[in-house]
Image (tube, rainbow, N blue to C red):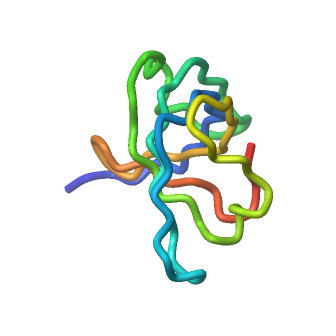
Amino acid sequence: MVQIVENWSRVTGTVEAFAPSGDPQRPGVLSLRISAVCPVEPFADLMAGWEGRTIEVPVPASLLPRLDLVPGRSVTLRLRRGGPTAVFSHPEEPG
């Protein structure tokens, strides 16, 4: 049985691509090359050491008006891991 740990990290990276869903209620998918990871107290930081990786992150539609997801731009998001490779963005707090 896998134990679930509440975790959040503040991740900064470069937008490599963004694919909107086409449905304003569904998340788009961000391809992000990670440059820095910072812990969010008091939560576990399960993304420490991920610098240099490119990840795919579903970005909730609620965040899109506050983010500029243009390739080459730097963006900071509050992310959590939900498994070995699954990553999710906080639905209300960009970074």
**Rendered view: 26 above or below 72:** below
- Quadrant in which the N terminus is drawn: bottom left
Horizontally, residue 94 falls left or right of residue 70, namely right
- Quadrant in which the C terminus is drawn: top right
The image position of residue 42, as x and y in percent, is 71, 38
Residue ranking furthest to the front = 71
Camera-side residue of 63 and 84: 63
Q: Residue at x 57, y 28 (%)?
A: 14
Q: Residue at x 44, y 42 (%)?
A: 31
Horizontally, residue 85 falls left or right of residue 29, namely left
Q: Residue at x 50, y 22 (%)?
A: 48
The image position of residue 3, as x and y in percent, is 33, 51
Camera-side residue of 70 and 11: 70
The image position of residue 49, as x and y in percent, is 45, 17
How many numbered marks have been drawn onto this rendered protein structure?
0
Horizontally, residue 20 falls left or right of residue 4, namely right
Residue ranking furthest to the left = 1
